[in-house]
Image: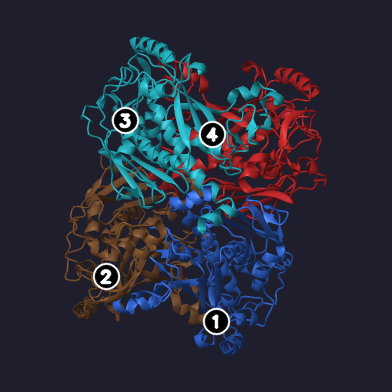
Chain colours: A red, B cyan, C brown, D blue
Amino acid sequence: MAGSSIGRNFTITTWGESHGKALGVVIDGCPAGIPLSVEDIMKDLDRRKPGQSRFTTPRKEEDQVDILSGVFEGKTTGTPISMIIYNTNQRSRDYSDIKDIYRPGHADFTYDAKYGFRDYRGGGRSSGRETAARVAAGALAKKILSELGIDVMAYTLAIDEVYIDRESFDRDEIYRNSLAMPDKEAAKRAGLLLEKRMAEKDSAGGIIETVVTGLAPGLGEPVFEKLDAALSKAIMSIGAVKGIEFGSGFKAGKMKGSDHNDSLYYDEDGQLRKETNNAGGLVGGISDGSDIVFRAAIKPTSSISKAQQSVSKDGTNKSIVVEGRHDPIIVPRAVVVFEAMTAIVLVDFLFMRILSNIDMIKKAYK
Amino acid sequence: MAGSSIGRNFTITTWGESHGKALGVVIDGCPAGIPLSVEDIMKDLDRRKPGQSRFTTPRKEEDQVDILSGVFEGKTTGTPISMIIYNTNQRSRDYSDIKDIYRPGHADFTYDAKYGFRDYRGGGRSSGRETAARVAAGALAKKILSELGIDVMAYTLAIDEVYIDRESFDRDEIYRNSLAMPDKEAAKRAGLLLEKRMAEKDSAGGIIETVVTGLAPGLGEPVFEKLDAALSKAIMSIGAVKGIEFGSGFKAGKMKGSDHNDSLYYDEDGQLRKETNNAGGLVGGISDGSDIVFRAAIKPTSSISKAQQSVSKDGTNKSIVVEGRHDPIIVPRAVVVFEAMTAIVLVDFLFMRILSNIDMIKKAYK
Amino acid sequence: MAGSSIGRNFTITTWGESHGKALGVVIDGCPAGIPLSVEDIMKDLDRRKPGQSRFTTPRKEEDQVDILSGVFEGKTTGTPISMIIYNTNQRSRDYSDIKDIYRPGHADFTYDAKYGFRDYRGGGRSSGRETAARVAAGALAKKILSELGIDVMAYTLAIDEVYIDRESFDRDEIYRNSLAMPDKEAAKRAGLLLEKRMAEKDSAGGIIETVVTGLAPGLGEPVFEKLDAALSKAIMSIGAVKGIEFGSGFKAGKMKGSDHNDSLYYDEDGQLRKETNNAGGLVGGISDGSDIVFRAAIKPTSSISKAQQSVSKDGTNKSIVVEGRHDPIIVPRAVVVFEAMTAIVLVDFLFMRILSNIDMIKKAYK
Amino acid sequence: MAGSSIGRNFTITTWGESHGKALGVVIDGCPAGIPLSVEDIMKDLDRRKPGQSRFTTPRKEEDQVDILSGVFEGKTTGTPISMIIYNTNQRSRDYSDIKDIYRPGHADFTYDAKYGFRDYRGGGRSSGRETAARVAAGALAKKILSELGIDVMAYTLAIDEVYIDRESFDRDEIYRNSLAMPDKEAAKRAGLLLEKRMAEKDSAGGIIETVVTGLAPGLGEPVFEKLDAALSKAIMSIGAVKGIEFGSGFKAGKMKGSDHNDSLYYDEDGQLRKETNNAGGLVGGISDGSDIVFRAAIKPTSSISKAQQSVSKDGTNKSIVVEGRHDPIIVPRAVVVFEAMTAIVLVDFLFMRILSNIDMIKKAYK
């Protein structure tokens, strides 16, 4: 069933398998008049690409994007934008070892159960490689948002037990250290932990935090298209994400109402403010003008070199070792995917927001 | 913008405000031939209705549903099923006290910001009362699932710090005690805690757990319509939910890959099994045949009788007390709403699952 | 499968059967701030209601609408608008005569084949009565359009061979004569023809023309959401419509390119004009600022008192006579349904139009 | 706004401009297990490609398709199928002559009005070249239908006044003569007429008829997703189509009910039959098991070498001649596009049909 599209008016459709000829994305519903170049896209794709540190697989994925349609004389035309990334480095290795095996933590069994067979080369469609297409679309979404003063930032909040120190928050560090942590010291400690995991032929998980600033109040549609609900779906659709929480999140379950409610007040300039942001920037599913803040948990990489108990398709139990070198952690490369999915949803909700009010419609239509 | 519908092929549209004439739901895409009566719906509506214990508001909401279309001679006809619940008990009290005030934790400000004005009577569309319509639709969804051997069960896992003891799990208790806890002793302790909160004019939060059993592998559509992603959206669209996690959830961020991966094996009957269920019943967004398990955090009730700092629309800061008696906790009455949203999503994904495989299509079409 | 909704951002969902308790419509995505009263709706519903002339069934359908949600203090709130029309006049007559019979020209057989059984009372969901719900939604859609200076007008162009004389076009006549013809003389001649058909226990068909004025250029989305394509679907979804054509229509098949192309020129005021309107107001599926013009053919009423060859469900051939008195022609009462469907589509496309251009979005969002 | 997708469960998204780098289509929702090769697609693409007769432009469009994803070991995998056609033959000619001109009958003005500017090279997105992507998707859709015994056939019914003689209907002729007419003699006469038009530097229009056989009853969803309504939208979305009619079509407007109603009877084998097929294979928007039959009018090619009155963007009236050699008629090359759009819609409705009945669902799910 059709499940590779997201968005109602700003619609993203990704396609492609990890070891097929290419992968790509079609963005339909992008307004005309946005300046767009290959460089705009590469900036984000480069943040996702592997082979950049000792914590990412040394596999070389060029991830060179080409824009095939929808842009003319440097600007979007309003028609579908098709972007393609050719899989240049898929050496035709022998996959017969995993062809008939269901790797623990992988979608091997579920794809077989659903479709009757599967493209077993490198995970096929279930591979994290698919997110390259999301990042390409997200780079465009972020450009649209920036035209309206909206900023989306994601970063590694924690790797295993190593959390950033919020007092030392340094945005530049996100793009500088190989773990996308906005805290140099925490990144160092997390690095040590990861080296330990690698030595154990094991992997680690973590938490990504996303913050949206500059958003006007009013985004989000009652009752099923609440902005937090839609963001949850988008984020949970990223492989390896096991949970998401907004503002106070799971802590809310243990708070008193009087502590949880964000007190409102007008500041000296008559601006409406909140004492706290337990809401995470949304009330009743609608943005309230403060920062949108959410966190998501990422499971440890499923592919590990340690021997594991598993099964083959034909009914026998067997011990397996997943060959090749894999990222010991998914988190740092997923950070830009979080930004992408967040931005894609926000553009769609920004569009819907305009349509919820006849005054806005009149202003636009004139 | 249109946001009151959910589901692609099995589509639910709710309408109505807390203090309007009525509220209701249209279910479009229900297959023909399902036996359906008003009693089927009332069974679940009664679980949600207030006034049943000392922990729910004594407001009397009759919540009597009427089925207006789509059922003929006791069976669904395949055409839209319209259900209505009249608001019989909305005494025309004076709302002038909250008309111009933005209550902390409520959607008063965001609705005003979005639409320019709002129906301020009892929260209008943002009221939890809207979930009665979801429960009505969910009762039907659960009937469809039961025709295929699928069961959906939600319950209170924790209220504040009081968790159930999994060793004492007793399903019948869910429907017996006023806190929907499957553990009598835990319910008692939670009751004491709630009485304390009520005495303090305050409120409490908690955690709901949902378990789906009997589901075949193969539900969930790569890559954006992953089943866990869609469930997250549906659950997060319930007011007051602040986070959701599947299987290992947020703990996954602190686990090693070798611990997190669910080992696979064939049991004595040649049945594929997992040693653990950290996956929560889904891999790659597709059900794997084991139980679907997720938990969600519910914030404490926003309406409290304690004085709070807030603002009025006209620009002045003021202290407010939310009048009336309100539930000191949302969790127990939300349990059946969780079941409803879960079932609604599952029916839709069950339909999509059939369409993903030409053999299934041929079997059905013949 | 869910098929009772239309529209992406301005979404209409109708429900109800001809002889059920009620029928209705939920309008989701109506912007906040539109003044709306029951009278606004009744004005159009009254144009559709039967029993008003010798050419409509004397059945009394009160068609009194009630607005149950989405309007507060006389204005739309931005949340779903639910409207209901109770079926007050469905005398419980005995339907055993048609229960097992497939009436020629009716959907009796196809509903049975699809769903396994059907609500046989008065056609159930396939009855023309369902269009009352469309008209209610259309009245609101026309209000939104009128806020932006857009007018939708439909009328009877022809009944059987009797066409209006375009030289005598008189808009007021549409609302004055019982055949909705904008030409008094033609209406008289058509009336005589209809009386002849009634005497023969037979029925007649005709053509409805729809004209939209005041529409800005730019509505319609390449390539599948062309405005003419979407209008065609909406109009063809009205029962009894057998064909639709825009501008030159079927004549285009016999024209030369040099005759068919609408020559462009600037008038004295520098306004872009066309010599002709063979395009029907759209090029490439996008409105060009001139009038949108289309025509649709309506088949003769299927229910006739004349004996017809047909079958019963159980496998026997039999002659049948459709009991009761029925409209000898569908056309005049369908005119307002055409306006409704046209307006519903236009509102949706107006919304989409705004989103196709970053300048419009910026203007609205500020 | 996103308008380049069609279909709910079987979803086609096309992208690309006439003179961009490439054009293509993503097919999402194709069930797993359908055998598919490049040759399957080329067979239909070759029927559409130009340069094959004296009535098509001698422009060489290679139209070589590549399948980039969704197929593994010769079968569809259930994940998105991306197909691409590179534009190899777009000589970089100088377009400055049409850059600022609005050609009559073309979408030049409407694109400019909508988007603020346009890709003027060869019509950009509004070019008929986009239909190559539809044909590629349609070839797959026809494969799926053929697995279920359903056949889709389109052909030229008329060119200008030259109609085929139904008595001489010969299906093989459709694929043999350059006008796709199933009547050799008519094709000859139409050829002479076209040569005359070409000599006059003018163009001609015509009518395409489409017939679907082997379809079970029950496809089509009340009330807005009627099968004829959905087909109308799909067909009207093909550029140059000015009208569509089913079965009796526009003639229905002049018929008596007793003539129009298709009498039903059981034949000697107890099979339900109709004396006539004025319905065109659908009643109440649902297929009745007989042939689906519809016709559509195609306007004469807009690009003609004859001088025409038009305007330039800057406000001046001017006479223009559209350079290059163009097809004097669109009809023959559009025939396979009609088949494609019809098949795409049918697959989607076949899927929906299965979901309308709990018995079918149970059969599939077991």
Do labels 2 and 3 touch, CB within 8 Å? Answer: no
From the viewer's perspective, is D258 left or right of D51?
left
Q: Which residue is mark 1?
A: D204
State the residue at coordinates (20%, 71%). Answer: C55
Q: Position of residue B126 (x, y in %)?
A: 37, 32
Marks 2/3: CA–CA distance? 45 Å
Tell me how far mark 1 sits from mark 3, CA to CA.
69 Å
Q: Are marks 1 and 3 on the same chain?
A: no
Q: Chain of mark 2?
A: C
Residue identified by numbered label 4: A232
Rendered image: mark on residue A116: none
- Mark 3 falls on what kind of element? helix
What is the chain identity of the residue bearing mark 3? B
Marks 1 and 3 in Cβ contact (< 8 Å): no
Compared with residue D320, is residue A258 higher up or lower down, i.e. above or below? above
Which residue position is annotated with label 3? B46
Do the residues bearing badges 4 and 3 touch, measured as CB atoms within 8 Å?
Answer: no
Judge the density around disc 3: few (<14), some (14-19), many (≥20) Cα neighbours within 10 Å.
some
* Number of the front mark, 2 or 4: 2
On the same chain: label 2 and label 3?
Answer: no
Q: Position of residue D105 (x, y in %)?
A: 52, 72
Name the foreground residue: C82 vs D34.
D34
Same chain for the residues at labels 1 and 4, yes or no?
no
Crowding at dot 4, Cα within 10 Å, few <14 / some 14-19 / many 20+, comes out as many
Disc 2 vs disc 4: Cβ atoms closer than 8 Å? no
